[in-house]
């Protein structure tokens, strides 16, 4: 029986943090045994914000190495770099020409991120969700595991596929591109900042203390958690809104300790922040240790990493080119000659 195909990726925009891991990569690791899994490092997306060209290649390689360190197995998953597959850029252009501008202007992430960019907002940032649609549609993905924050972009990809490609160009109900479904994983779907429990933990936040990076040393993890924002209530509880810091830190602890929310709610109900933070520090350091060890083993083995990314690109190119030819033909382009 054919396995359902999934596609996902992370931008190499800096150090990956526990939000990227718990909200995304950890899910791919679980899914790769039961699904045909494609995971890419979305470097074309990374240049939609201001970036350092000297660091881009290194961050791309490090992000791929972190996928492997977190448990992505290249024998079960296709691991590749987005820009190594030219079809992403070409399909993005074709979809650009089919998508109304006002569909993009209502994207929440664009509104939020464009405020941060001020007057320097790039067209690429506005176009980000179209590139994401191209990423997904190229691989005929059945499911796209995404955090809550990416749900709106996936809806857009579905609308483009259905209304702008299949309905307009598919003759006799012919499906040109597969319409993907979101796979929202509830646990860990949204890990919040350590300095503000109401905003998302993010790679590009200027304050490094707002996140725990996967490669942070035990000392740094300890320091960051000790400084993490708390409230003045006694006893810790999940409230789902009223106590955002308690919700977030307890939630992280519930996942990292493997105990789950119910057990943790009982364990911490009468605990003060000081004792709780020590538990969280220990659980975080313990959980990240195997990832950091594995990362250190592979990151300097350039041949190993190069081979994985080369094989991944070959496989991805072959699938993506087939889809792109289907779309080009449906849109009426002259076939390439020779
Ligand atoms: N805080 C988070 N909690 C849960 N999941 C998260 N993801 C990101 N932050 C959290 C998930 O990680 C995947 C890849 O994210 P991305 O790199 O494509 O972009 P992002 O969502 O914008 O992530 P960041 O860390 O906030 O990066 P910057 O600061 O560069 O924009 C996605 O599946 C996302 O849901």
Image (cartoon, rainbow, N blue to C red):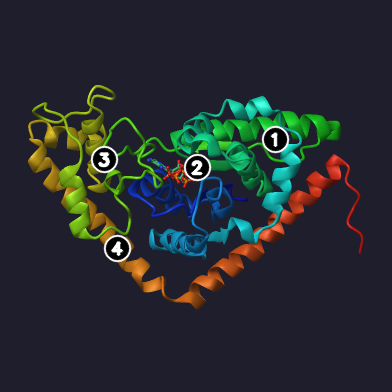
For disc 4, the marked residue is 290
Whole-percent x, y for residue 107 in the image: 55, 29
Whole-percent x, y for residue 234 in the image: 8, 28
Name the N-terminal-most of marks 1 and 4.
1
Q: CA distance from mark 2 to mark 4?
A: 24 Å
- Mark 1 Cβ inside 8 Å of ligand 1: no
Pointers 3 and 2 in contact (C-beta within 8 Å): no
Q: CA distance from mark 1 to mark 2?
A: 18 Å
| Dot in front, 4 or 3 | 3
Whole-percent x, y for residue 78 in the image: 56, 60
Q: Tell me: 183 left or right of 191.
A: right
| Dot in front, 3 or 2 | 3
Secondary structure found at label 1: helix
Name the N-terminal-most of marks 1 and 2.
2
For disc 3, the marked residue is 194
- Mark 2 Cβ inside 8 Å of ligand 1: yes
Circle 1 residues within 10 Å: few <14, some 14–19, many ≥20: many
Name the N-terminal-most of marks 3 and 1.
1
Looking at the rendering, the quadrant in which ligand 1 lies is: top left
Q: CA distance from mark 3 to mark 2?
A: 24 Å
Secondary structure found at label 4: helix
Q: CA distance from mark 1 to mark 4?
A: 40 Å
Q: Tell me: 169 left or right of 286.
A: right
Identified at 43% across, 47% down, the residue is 27
């Amino acid at each position: 029986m054919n396995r359902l195909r999934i596609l996902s990726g992370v931008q190499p925009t800096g150090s990956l943090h526990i939000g990227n891991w718990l909200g995304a990569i950890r899910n791919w690791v679980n899914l790769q045994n039961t699904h045909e899994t494609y995971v890419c490092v979305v470097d074309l997306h990374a240049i939609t914000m201001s970036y350092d060209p000297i660091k881009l290649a290194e961050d791309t390689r490090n992000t791929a190495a972190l996928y492997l360190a977190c448990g992505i197995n290249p024998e079960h998953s296709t691991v590749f770099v987005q820009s190594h597959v030219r079809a992403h850029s070409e399909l993005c252009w074709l979809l650009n020409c089919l998508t109304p501008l006002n569909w993009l202007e209502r994207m929440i992430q664009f509104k939020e991120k464009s405020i941060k960019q001020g007057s320097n907002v790039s067209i690429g940032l506005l176009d980000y969700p179209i590139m994401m649609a191209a990423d997904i549609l190229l691989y005929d993905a059945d499911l796209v595991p995404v955090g809550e924050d990416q749900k709106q972009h996936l809806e857009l990809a579905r609308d483009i596929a259905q209304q702008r490609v299949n309905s307009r160009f598919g003759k006799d109900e012919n499906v040109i591109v597969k319409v993907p479904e979101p796979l929202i994983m509830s646990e860990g779907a949204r890990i919040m900042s350590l300095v503000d429990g109401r905003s998302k933990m993010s790679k590009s936040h200027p304050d490094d203390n707002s996140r725990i990076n996967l490669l942070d040393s035990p000392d740094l993890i300890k320091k960051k958690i000790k400084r993490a924002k708390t409230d003045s209530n006694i006893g810790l509880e999940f409230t789902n809104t009223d106590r955002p810091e308690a919700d977030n830190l307890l939630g992280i602890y519930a996942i990292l300790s493997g105990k789950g929310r119910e057990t943790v709610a009982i364990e911490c109900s009468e605990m003060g922040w000081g004792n709780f933070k020590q538990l969280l520090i220990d659980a975080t350091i313990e959980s990240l240790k195997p990832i950091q060890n594995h990362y250190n083993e592979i990151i300097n083995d350039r041949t190993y990493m190069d081979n994985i990314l080369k094989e991944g690109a070959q496989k991805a190119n072959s699938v993506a080119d087939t889809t792109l030819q289907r779309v080009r033909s449906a849109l009426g382009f002259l076939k390439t000659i020779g």
